[in-house]
């Protein structure tokens, strides 16, 4: 089983600032990782796949990087609507997949 | 437009069974892998199970292996999750999700709104 570990659990950032979220895999997963955003009462929304490709309609301020075991989601200039919980997801282990435990991005 | 609609949730006693369904539309159902993901109230996402387009590949999380069975009926555009020997820690919203790409190894492009299972 591939374990995904996200850090930090909570990140406090001011609007307009940059946010950097991390995700580590317990074994190499190439670039088979996605990032999702979830707001209260909503279903997860796909932001990034293949580690660095933005999904359709996702603003350019969201970017992803990494390969192997270390991955990063960066939000370059935080907007009010970006404060949410973010999850990484590995699909390299298909049909056994896994999510990180989430990072809550809150307003500082 | 892709639509995934889960049903079958509810209140169930520990040790009993429940069968969830996910009705799909808006895409060629028998071409894509599908998944169940759950989320306990106030907690994070937990992958539960996946099934390939032809049911030839199936995977389960360790927490449900031996108790849950995933299946699909391509003729009826439906995904199922048979949940047996339910425990209180199975309490969660259960979402079905669709792959973005064919063949597995894909992010989850679309999600249903979820169905709530309460084991108590």
Image (cartoon, rainbow, N blue to C red):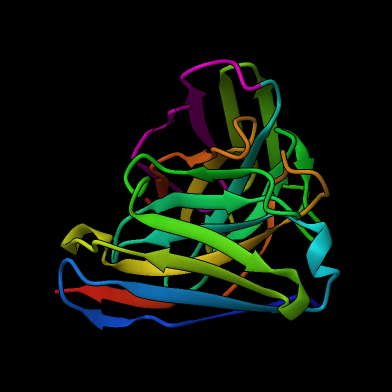
Can you say which quadrant of the picture contains the N terminus of chain B? bottom right
Q: Which residue is at 73% across, 43% downward?
A: B104
Answer with the quarter of the image where residue A95 lies. top right
Q: Quick one: A14 or B70, which is closer to the camera?
A: B70
Placement of A83 over or under A99, stated as above or below: below
Find residue A65 and report its horizontal and vertical position in percent: 69, 27
- Residue located at (80% from left, 64% from top): B30
Q: Quadrant of the C terminus of chain B?
A: bottom left
B49 left or right of B83 in image: right
Return the x and y of residue A89 as percentages of the image width and height.
Answer: 56, 41
Q: Can I make out residue B111 in this image?
A: yes
Residue at 46% across, 75% down? B20
The image shows residue B31 at horizontal and vertical percentages of 83, 59
Locate residue A33 relative to residue A81 in the image: left or right.
Answer: right
Nearer to me, A66 or A15: A66
Q: Report the span colored magenta.
A: A1-29
**Observer-nearest of B93 and B12:** B12
| Residue A93, magenta (yes or no) | no
* Residue B62 versus residue B102 in the image, above or below: above
Q: Nearer the viewer, residue B88 or A67?
A: B88
Q: Confirm whether the magenta stretch covers residue A9.
A: yes
Q: Position of residue B44 (x, y in %)?
A: 37, 53
Residue B78, quarter of picture: bottom right
């Amino acid at each position: 089983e591939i374990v995904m570990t996200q850090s930090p659990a909570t990140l406090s950032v001011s609007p307009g600032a940059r946010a950097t979220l991390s995700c580590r895999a317990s074994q190499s997963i190439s670039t088979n990782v996605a990032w999702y955003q979830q707001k209260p009462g909503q279903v997860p929304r796909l932001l990034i796949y293949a580690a660095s490709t933005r999904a359709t309609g996702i603003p350019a301020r969201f970017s992803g990087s990494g390969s192997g075991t270390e991955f990063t989601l960066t939000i370059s200039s935080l907007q009010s609507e970006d404060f949410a919980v973010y999850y990484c997801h590995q699909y390299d282990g298909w049909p056994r997949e896994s999510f990180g435990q989430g990072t809550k991005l809150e307003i500082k | 437009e892709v639509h995934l609609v889960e049903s079958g949730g509810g209140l169930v006693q520990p040790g009993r069974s429940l069968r969830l369904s996910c009705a799909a539309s808006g895409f060629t159902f028998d071409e894509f892998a599908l998944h169940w993901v759950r989320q306990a109230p106030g907690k994070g996402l937990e992958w539960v199970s996946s099934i390939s387009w032809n049911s030839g590949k199936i995977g389960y999380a360790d927490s449900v292996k031996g108790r849950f069975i995933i299946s699909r009926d391509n003729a009826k555009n439906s995904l199922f999750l048979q949940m047996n020997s339910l425990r209180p820690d199975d309490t969660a919203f259960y979402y079905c999700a669709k792959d973005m790409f064919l063949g597995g190894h894909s992010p989850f492009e679309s999600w249903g709104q979820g169905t709530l299972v309460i084991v108590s």
